[in-house]
Image (cartoon, helix red, strand yellow):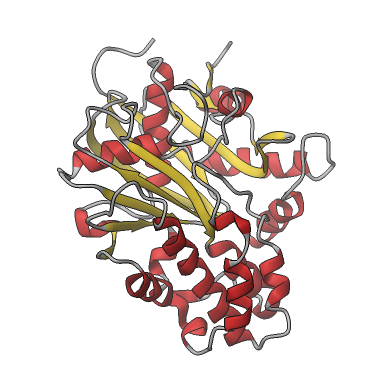
């Protein structure tokens, strides 16, 4: 059992961009954010990334899955063991497949292994309970985003955008008493973000990313490809809604015959257009859009967002937050909510019919 009041929790996140593992300490009681602590990052090397890529889209039982899980567990153990004491750990794992209306959701990595190795209780498998009860299982950061909005003293509706492999956005009314309140949050995946760009750069140039959006800035986006992309029914679908990393894989096929710079420019513009279309679903206009995740470093993508959005677009650093660590911090916060029996998702975030507390807890020696 956790002691009463705020505790230090250590969260870890390995996102769909497959760059590596982020970890961060958060002091929280599961409702308020009291303080932020140490952070760390452990990149995947080329061999590890290749093993993970080979397992994308696969489910337990496929031969590629166990090696991917071992990579995930090893990388997390190496990073998390470098931190000082924490009351518990929030471990997301690596999403390999996400099909909430079909086979469910699959994150590689076993929290019980980490609990034994690190000697600390581990909260993990955050998504399965939500999916089992009819939810999308994603996104899971919105209740944390609500706490962030209160932490920074927001008094008007605002939105947090995470630009990882997939884009996801949370609309927040910070004047309501908590994230569980009706109308407090609306969250959904906007569309592809960094994943197609990274995949293109890897395939064509052997690079992990388009650093700062430089290649995209040198090209011209293809209007025909963009029109086909935006004509897809996803953008009209009422949220909450969630995506798998590969759901828009046909976008890469659509730019296959374009020169490198034009292909990259098209994928980058597509990511921004997807966010702008998502904003059409907001209950009310927002006062600002705060951007986290690796995509905020893409100058070209951020410029497109500033052009397309009807509000100021800023990296979360503008309000004193760490945009590289928000998702890791989110799983530290959510771990405390799970341990205290508080909900981690609800109708406005995943479409589940009622408030759900996801996650299981593995304790060392259990």
Residue 290 in the image: above or below residue 256: above
Image point (54%, 44%), residue name: 241
Q: Residue 46 location in percent, x, y?
A: 66, 62
Identify the image quadrant of residue 235: bottom right
Q: Residue 80 location in percent, x, y?
A: 47, 38
Residue 287 in the image: above or below residue 81: below
Q: Is residue 61 left or right of residue 250?
A: right
The answer to whether residue 364 is visible is yes
Image point (34%, 67%), residue name: 309
The answer to whether residue 166 is visible is no
Near-viewer residue (253 or 73): 253
Q: Residue 61 location in percent, x, y?
A: 83, 35
Q: Residue 52 location in percent, x, y?
A: 69, 51
Q: Is residue 203 left or right of residue 44?
A: right
Looking at the rendering, in which quadrant would you find the C terminus? top right
Identify the image quadrant of residue 289: bottom left
């Amino acid at each position: 059992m956790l002691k009463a009041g705020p505790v230090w929790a250590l969260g870890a996140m390995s996102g769909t961009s497959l760059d590596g593992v982020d970890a961060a300490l958060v002091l929280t009681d599961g409702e308020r954010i009291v303080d932020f602590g140490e952070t760390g990052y452990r990149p995947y090397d080329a061999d590890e990334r290749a093993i993970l890529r080979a397992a994308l889209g696969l489910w337990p039982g496929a031969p590629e899955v166990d090696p991917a899980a071992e990579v995930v567990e090893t990388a997390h153990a190496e990073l998390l063991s470098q931190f000082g004491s924490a009351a518990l750990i929030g471990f997301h794992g690596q999403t390999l497949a996400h099909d909430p209306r079909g086979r469910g959701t699959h994150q590689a990595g076993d929290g019980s292994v980490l609990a034994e190795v690190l000697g600390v209780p581990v909260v993990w498998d955050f998504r399965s309970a939500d999916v089992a009860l009819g939810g999308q299982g994603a996104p899971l950061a919105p209740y944390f985003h609500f706490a962030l909005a209160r932490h920074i003293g927001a008094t008007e509706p605002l939105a947090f955008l995470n630009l990882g492999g997939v884009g996801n956005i949370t609309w927040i009314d910070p004047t309501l008493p908590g994230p569980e309140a009706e109308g407090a949050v609306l969250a959904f995946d906007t569309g592809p973000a960094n994943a197609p760009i990274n995949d293109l750069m890897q395939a064509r140039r052997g690079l992990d990313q388009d650093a700062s959006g430089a290649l995209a800035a040198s090209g011209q986006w293809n209007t025909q490809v963009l029109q086909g992309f935006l004509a897809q029914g996803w953008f009209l679908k009422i949220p909450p809604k969630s995506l798998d990393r590969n759901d828009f894989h046909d976008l890469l096929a659509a730019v296959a015959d374009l020169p490198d710079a034009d292909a990259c420019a098209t994928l980058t513009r597509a990511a921004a257009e997807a966010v702008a279309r998502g904003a059409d679903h907001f209950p009310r206009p927002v006062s600002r859009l705060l951007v986290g995740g690796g995509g905020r470093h893409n100058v070209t993508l951020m410029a497109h967002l500033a052009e397309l959005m009807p509000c100021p677009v800023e990296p979360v650093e503008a309000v004193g937050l760490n945009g590289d660590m928000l998702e890791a911090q989110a799983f530290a916060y959510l771990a405390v909510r799970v341990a205290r029996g508080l909900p981690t998702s609800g109708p406005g975030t995943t479409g589940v019919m009622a408030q759900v507390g996801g996650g299981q807890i593995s304790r060392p020696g259990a």
